[in-house]
Image: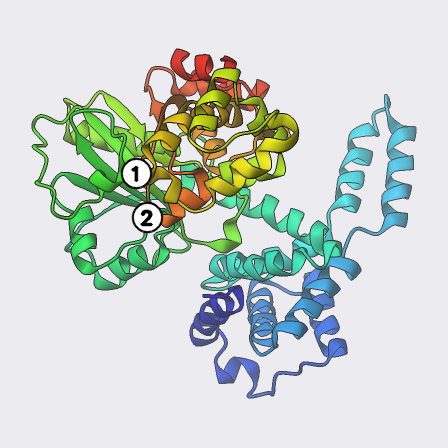
Amino acid sequence: MTGSGLVSRSLSKVRELVVNAAQLGRETVAKDPEHIRRQLQECAEGRGGEVSTRLRAARLAETYLHLDDAQRRGFLRMIAHEFGPDPAQVANAHEAYQAAVGTPAQWDAEARLRAAMRSRRLRILTQFNAIPQGVKFLVDLRADLLRYLADDPALKPLDRELETRLSAWFDVGFLELQRITWNSPAALLEKLVGYEAVHEIQSWQDLKNRLDSDRRCYAFFHPRMPLEPLIFVQVALLEDLADDVQRLLDIEAPLADTTKATTAIFYSISATQPGLRGVSFGNFLLKRVIDDLKRDFPRLHVFATLSPIPGLARWARRHPDALAAAVTPADAKRLAAAGVAADDFATDGVGALLDRLDGGAWAADAALAAALQDVLLRLAARYLLEARRDERPTDAVARFHLGNGARVERLNWLADTSPKGFAQSWGLMVNYLYDPERIEANVEAFASEGRIDASTAVRRLARR
């Protein structure tokens, strides 16, 4: 579903619950820019009391509902460009603050400076909290905003402010954990199917398998969005560390004996709200799930994931030198014997190698697959431990798990041989291990220093 569709669905609830015909005086919603500007100015000025604020926000939401996509972009551009802090007021307040530093007036001057820097954009956005479904409206509004950003970077200040506010509202401490079972409401099960982003749910039988007695599924909810799950977490209860997602998802496989289970494998974690992209839910998200599992299954002592490496192949194509550097002389001989020869992979061989890796046909060639195994495992280890974007791991899944206190434990060869698995990581997957005794220390080290915890085996692969 598009961001526009999400917003329309959310705002229809706003209209139903808040903006009835009597409140609006049965007026026709005006779409002209001047009328919208006046509505925004009223919100920015915060006139009246709580009732006025609620009605004003509802009218503004109703206006947004009636706009087409181009008009919505114009609406957001208007907020971004015309309702930021007043530069003159900020300059005057800053000058007064500098003059007051070290005097009894310093703290009053600081308060005035802080007030001058408070964006009117934020004042407008915050007023939507006053209406039912207001938080959901803002989440869906940001889904629209994110779609426009690529072509309209001038919207970035508005996005930054909205992301900051949503991050404060959606910290893990505010989220509610709920177990999902086959007996959960049908609407919730349909959302689980629709939002599954890691391993597509193929049928109702597939869904039932994922909710069977040897599995657990959880959803996180925000109290202001009680009918909208934010994250689904799917868990398999096993006797050892999983290394093959095909076996994990096999609907014909016999049920595991949960009385013997020692290992909980998080094999799918799916976010559901596009408007919360980039919003951190805080650390210790999965620790909440671990605590629940330990309460039900005291024998569990290993908590790990079987995770995709979604950015690996894309990163390697952008950095062919990294792939070339992963090919040792011994690897080059094996590749040549398997039909991928080059005088020097750093200069003339890496392109041919990338071509051979397109699709998954190479995996059926035993000699070629054997020649590639060390190369790709070495490349994946370096990617996870060394590739950076904004001083954080390039891979989005790695950022999530490392930020929640996990350790890069093991790389798994041909663990996902689906077309998607080959396309994003040539079939490789990774186990992130959550050691309850080390989670807090890992969270702190990663947040403060960017330090990544990894097993000796993975570090050795990266150095080799």
Q: Residue at x 14, y 55 (%)?
A: 183
Residue 57 lies, with reference to residue 368, above or below; the image says: below
Which amino acid lies under the numbered mark 2 shown in the image of this protein? His
Q: Position of residue 199 (x, y in %)?
A: 32, 48
Dot 1 corresponds to which residue? 267
Which amino acid lies under the numbered mark 1 shown in the image of this protein? Tyr
Task: Report which quarter residue 315 is drawn in.
Answer: top right
Task: Report which quarter residue 377 is drawn in.
Answer: top left
Task: Give the structural element (helix, strand or loop) at label 1.
Answer: strand
Q: Position of residue 59 (x, y in %)?
A: 59, 74
Task: Give the structural element (helix, strand or loop) at label 2.
Answer: loop
Residue 81 visible in the current orientation = yes
User: 142 or 149: nearer the eye?
Assistant: 149
Residue 377 lies, with reference to residue 13, above or below; the image says: above
Left or right of residue 267: residue 33: right
User: 361 or 441: nearer the eye?
Assistant: 361
Q: Position of residue 244 (x, y in %)?
A: 26, 34
Q: Residue at x 41, y 26 (%)?
A: 371
Mark sitting earlier along the chain (2/1): 2
How crowded pointer 2 is (Cα within 10 Å; few <14, some 14-19, many 20+) is rated as: some
Q: Position of residue 384 (x, y in %)?
A: 49, 27
Task: Report which quarter residue 103 is drawn in.
Answer: top right
Contact (CB < 8 A) between labels 2 and 1? yes
The numbered disc on residue 147 is none
Separation of marks 2 and 1 at Cα, in angstroms? 9 Å
Left or right of residue 85: residue 209: left
Residue 429 visible in the current orientation = no
